Amino acid sequence: MSLAFLAFEVFAHFNGWHYFHNRGLHIPQTLEIKGWLHAIYVAWLEFRADYIAPSIQVLSSFCVALFLIQSADRMLLCLGCFWIKYKKIKPRIEGDPFKSDDLEGSGYDYPMVLVQIPMCNEREVYEQSISAVCQLDWPKDRLLIQVLDDSDDESIQWLIKGEVSKWSQKGVNIIYRHRLVRTGYKAGNLKSAMNCDYVKAYEFVAIFDADFQPNPDFLTQTVPHFKDNPELGLVQARWAFVNKDENLLTRLQNINLCFHFEVEQQVNGVFINFFGFNGTAGVWRIKTLEDSGGWLERTTVEDMDIAVRAHLNGWKFIFLNEVKVLCEVPESYEAYRKQQHRWHSGPMHLFRLCLPAIITSKISVWKKANLILLFFLLRKLILPFYSFTLFCIILPLTMFVPEAELPVWVICYVPVFMSFLNILPAPRSFPFIVPYLLFENTMSVTKFNAMVSGLFQLGSSYEWVVTKKAGRSSEPDLLAAAERETKAMNHPQLYRGSSDSELSELNKLKEHQETAPKPKKTNKLYRKELALAFLLLTAAVRSLLSAQGVHFYFLLFQGVSFLLVGLDLIGEQMS
């Protein structure tokens, strides 16, 4: 359609029918008509002005209103963040939380902490994750580490067992668990682990995904916040990224996630004691999980699910912006796209499920309004809807229907200002503000599709694809690994808890891993992105004919952005 419209307009342009230069839309009279093709063009102008333009104008006005509401929400969040920094507001621990009042006692009272590492086919990152967790600074007799392996690849299972055995021989209280019936994805894995009888002896549970590497002082910085605070159910730490400068895709993700943690999570944590659990790098009071119904397998956002249910039961949350846990962001567009699909379809699926519980809960009316209007509708539904509809559909259509023109401030000024606010938590990323704005509009296709899928429970709404990891390590990790390798060469060790056959199998797997040829990396074509690239670039040519400067440049660069993504030319390619 866009190509046909463009051909028609180009033909009219070269025949001197410059009606789109006149904002009054002069309609020729009968005497002015020069042939049947000219008559068809006049009929199209009348139909366009009377029937198509009004419907587009109504939809665009609705989307602009949503855009302004969402921008106001972002502004308030940023003002809240500035206030927190100005007043230096942050959760603090008073005194020495482990100091005992009993002078005859040991002097310290460390609670029992369970640490869980859920993973599934995480060949690239299992070793560094287990290593980091095993070096947590906490009494060994008051700490238990569960490696919850859902891998269906036996070779990966053997490798993880070997790593667990190695740390067990060093005196770490660590166990390996593998489910025979692998249902419910991560939620099913965590639910199965919490059903173990020995879990009853523990008061808190810390959760780390397979690519997360906590610092040794993680527990000493988080667990003390629970002391003398019986209403506190969750302490969430911030993520930091070892590969944020790897390529353009990782840099753009870093901008988004820095805003999410420093602004959204911190402001919500300080002012309303509630935010969505990030699924990892957090510590839960086990009583909170039990009181809220435990892990449920009904959605792919089990972390948000348990957070909402805990909030409805009156539990409070704390976000620690200063406590950072290293992890990875996806380096390929394919991995990032699948991750974003899950992150945007799951909340809409959850919204359908928990809306009755929110309405009938005993929390205050303003907390219900915050959950329904802000947490779910505005930030999870409205944002991808208006972003996709306004900038990817309505804007190019207005090039062919100029009677429904979008004002420049909607296309340029407000988006640039909001992008500037989004980039403030990551000031070193300021040179990437334009690519960030264009990429966010490009990702709106995936997010809109995922939102619709989750809201109407379509086929892909309950789909979980493990995000592909690269196995990046920080500089301290690399130095520590080199030191361990040197020691291993000087003092070769055996896994005393393993049989000869197990050792032989493990050595064979490691040799195969080192010698196996690396799979070739390939580009994947994304048809939705390519189709929109075609529409936007065609609309850009149409805007050039009508000399619409800002519209032309926006459509051109946005079309090129869609083209690069559609051809998989951003980030690493998948193996």
Image (cartoon, rainbow, N blue to C red):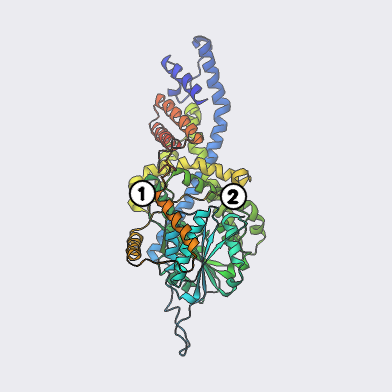
Residue 348: which numbered mark, if any?
2
Residue 458, percent from left and from top: 62, 43
Q: How many marks?
A: 2
Give the labeled residue for mark 1: 246
Residue 564: which numbered mark, if any?
none
Q: For mark 2, give the secondary structure.
A: helix
Q: Residues within 10 Å of mark 1 (few under 14, many from 20)?
A: some
> In the image shown, does 221 or 438 lie closer to the viewer?
221
Q: Is residue 179 visible?
A: yes
In the rendered image of this protein, does residue 417 appear above or below residue 136?
Answer: above
In the rendered image of this protein, does residue 565 appear above or below residue 246?
Answer: above
Q: Amino acid at mark 1?
A: Glu
- Residue drawn 60% across the image and 62% down it: 191
- Residue drawn 39% across the image and 54% down it: 472
In the rendered image of this protein, does residue 170 appear above or below residue 461?
Answer: below
> In the image shown, does 528 or 332 lie closer to the viewer?
332
In this rendering, would 226 be left or right of 254?
A: right
Residue 253, percent from left and from top: 42, 49
- Residue drawn 34% across the image and 48% down it: 430
> In the image shown, does 390 or 495 lie closer to the viewer?
495
Residue 534, percent from left and from top: 46, 30
Residue 300, percent from left and from top: 58, 53
Q: Examine the image and state in which quarter residue 134 appears.
A: bottom left
Residue sitting at the far front: 500
- Residue drawn 55% across the image and 37% down it: 59
